[in-house]
């Protein structure tokens, strides 16, 4: 019988995917390295080599090779691989796959072999299905390592370039803050004021100084149908990632208002470098210590003057809780303190046949009468005493040049006094810190027992905390003295020379604190020193 021939099995045809990637840093590839040309090269390669059928093309244009995360094209490719639609991946070279040495090696050595997927890199001559020589086994990790080093070097250069721009006061963010726009032409690298939202920002600062809470300001803006930052950017067609409220509810809220009130950008100071990425391979972002931020005062036009921003920042540290149902803080809210213990003075109502009359008393006394006196003062008498102090202060400063010069002399003397106090406090902080260390050494050596050490440590820690608070107060007052020139102070006083009643804005601009003594004495401490006597009492008026 004639012998029959066994037919040869048909050669395997791989269902191949063409993958192309180009990052913004890959300028050296030029036109030849574009995504379209990468796919064209892969198609030509498949046509010239049997056994490959390009069934799909995947692209990531403008995506870094330092990570495989958040690449849409790569994500779709992996999904089709896992679904069994793809069993071969073809790239122009291994760097198109990625530049992260560890991740690329994991895919080539573990993931794709386990899935039965062939990988081919044309210009590198790499084919995972080909038999490997010892030289091949050595060269593949070396190529991946060089790709990784390229990405590391590019990341370092980018960081250095951005850091240099930040130090020069250039804006390097992707999007300008609400109220500003990114400059172009001669203003390239700078923020320029965007008039419409800038007006909203000024209104927010004015409302805050006027006594409104952040929630109250947000409600006012919503009632006035002012677009929120997210709505404003969306209306302008600026698709952007925003930290402001977004989603189904894009209205103004207290959090958005507080972010604006605390942003130094609006005072003309560009603050950048608040976060960093320690590893170019990962998306993790870390917060940078405030002392290492890049600050550039005067880098752009301010929307609110620095003095106004400083006032609002100081208000944030005061207790200005509103009464139930109130929309604005009372004139002296957050400024009234007991002269003896330093506690805040709380407002109470006294009901009489003639109607309600309000008074203030020491909070410490309310909690424990043995610790401090009541320091009771009627609200109307308090307001009148403060107004007398303001009028006397304003008349003396505005009507005589000598008084203004006196204010400047006061600031000079006060700066010297504060410098001496600061040096003394820092010395005591250092002394108590050394004492804390010696105490631990005595405990470790058995000179004192654990109970003694704990008691002494608590006392020293409390003292250190007190001294640090005193130091912070001195530094704040020093900053206040440097904030405003005598001319500005004079102009501020002039606005209130003929004021008839106590107003919130007046208190915020002129007064640092009001101290109430047990005998009814009221001391008004002004923000920039007191060239005239400003101690008022219900009986004596202004001294």
Image (spheres, grey):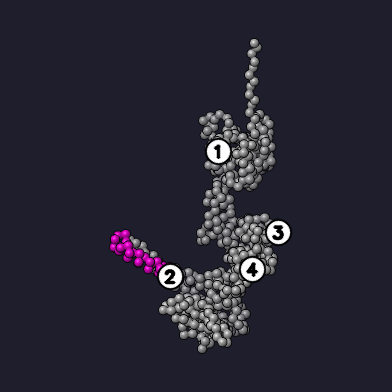
Query: Which residue is drawn at the image coordinates 47% and 82% (left, top)?
Result: 375
Asked if residue 451 is among those painted magenta in the image, a careful observer would answer yes
Asked if residue 459 is among those painted magenta in the image, a careful observer would answer yes
Residue position marked by numbered label 1 in the rendering: 111
* Magenta part of the chain: 442-466
In this rendering, the label closer to the viewer, 4 or 2: 4
Counting from the top left corner in percent of width and height, residue 128 is at 57, 33
Q: Are marks 3 and 2 in contact (CB under 8 Å)?
A: no
Q: Secondary structure at mark 1?
A: helix
Query: Which residue is drawn at the image coordinates 55% and 85% (left, top)?
Result: 352
Q: Are marks 1 and 2 in contact (CB under 8 Å)?
A: no
Residue position marked by numbered label 3 in the rendering: 236
Q: CA distance from mark 3 to mark 2?
A: 51 Å
The disc, 3 or 4, on the residue closer to the chain's N-terminal end is 4
The disc, 1 or 4, on the residue closer to the chain's N-terminal end is 1
Q: CA distance from mark 4 to mark 2?
A: 39 Å
Q: Along the horizontal axis of the image, is 54 left or right of 477?
A: right
Q: Are marks 3 and 4 in contact (CB under 8 Å)?
A: no
Q: CA distance from mark 1 to mark 3?
A: 45 Å
Instruction: Name the mark on residue 123.
Output: none
The disc, 4 or 2, on the residue closer to the chain's N-terminal end is 4
């Amino acid at each position: 019988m004639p012998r029959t021939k066994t037919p040869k099995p048909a050669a395997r045809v791989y269902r191949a995917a063409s993958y192309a990637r180009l990052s913004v840093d890959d300028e050296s590839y030029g036109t030849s390295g574009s995504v379209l040309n990468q796919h064209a090269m892969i198609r030509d390669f498949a046509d010239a080599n049997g056994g490959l059928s390009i069934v799909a093309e995947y692209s990531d244009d403008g995506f870094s090779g330092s990570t495989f995360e958040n690449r849409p094209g790569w994500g779709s490719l992996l999904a089709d691989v896992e679904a069994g639609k793809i069993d071969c991946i073809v790239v122009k070279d291994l760097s198109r796959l990625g530049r992260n040495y560890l991740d690329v090696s994991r895919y080539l050595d573990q993931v794709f072999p386990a899935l039965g997927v062939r990988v081919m890199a044309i210009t590198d001559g790499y084919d995972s299905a080909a038999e490997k020589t010892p030289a091949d086994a050595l060269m593949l990790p070396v190529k991946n390592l060089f790709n990784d080093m390229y990405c590391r070097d590019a990341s370092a250069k980018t960081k250095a370039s951005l850091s240099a721009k930040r130090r020069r006061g250039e804006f390097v963010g992707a999007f300008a803050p609400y109220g500003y726009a990114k400059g172009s032409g001669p203003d390239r690298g700078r923020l320029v004021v965007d008039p419409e939202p800038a007006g909203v920002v000024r209104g927010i600062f004015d409302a805050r100084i006027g006594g409104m809470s952040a929630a109250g300001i947000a409600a006012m803006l919503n009632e006035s149908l002012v677009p929120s930052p997210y709505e404003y950017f969306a209306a302008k067609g600026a698709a952007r990632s925003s930290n402001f409220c977004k989603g189904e509810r894009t209205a103004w809220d207290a959090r958005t208002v507080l972010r604006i009130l605390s942003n130094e950008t609006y005072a003309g100071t560009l603050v950048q470098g608040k976060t960093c990425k320690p590893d170019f391979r990962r998306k993790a972002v870390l917060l940078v210590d405030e002392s290492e931020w890049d600050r550039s005062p005067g880098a752009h036009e301010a929307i609110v003057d620095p003095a106004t921003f400083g006032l609002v920042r100081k208000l944030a540290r005061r207790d200005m809780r509103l009464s139930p149902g109130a929309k604005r803080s009372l004139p002296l809210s957050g400024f009234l303190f007991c002269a003896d213990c330093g506690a805040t003075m709380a407002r109470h109502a006294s009901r009489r046949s003639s109607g309600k009359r309000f008074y203030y008393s020491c909070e410490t006394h309310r909690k424990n009468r043995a610790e401090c006196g009541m320091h009771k003062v009627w609200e109307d008498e308090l307001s009148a005493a403060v107004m007398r102090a303001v009028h006397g202060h304003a008349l003396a400063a505005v009507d005589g040049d000598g008084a203004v010069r006196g204010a400047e002399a006061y600031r000079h003397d006060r700066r010297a006094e504060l410098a001496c106090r600061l040096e003394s406090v820092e010395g005591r902080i250092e002394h108590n810190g050394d004492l804390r260390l010696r105490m631990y050494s005595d405990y470790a050596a058995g000179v004192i027992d654990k109970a003694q050490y704990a008691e002494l440590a608590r006392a020293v820690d409390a003292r250190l905390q007190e001294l640090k608070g005193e130091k912070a107060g001195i530094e704040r007052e020093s900053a206040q003295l440097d904030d405003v020139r005598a001319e500005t102070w004079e102009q501020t006083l002039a606005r209130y020379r003929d004021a008839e009643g106590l107003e919130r804005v007046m208190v915020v601009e002129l007064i640092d604190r009001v101290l109430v003594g047990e005998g009814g004495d009221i001391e008004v401490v002004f923000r920039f020193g007191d060239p005239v006597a400003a101690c008022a009492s219900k009986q004596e008026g202004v001294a």
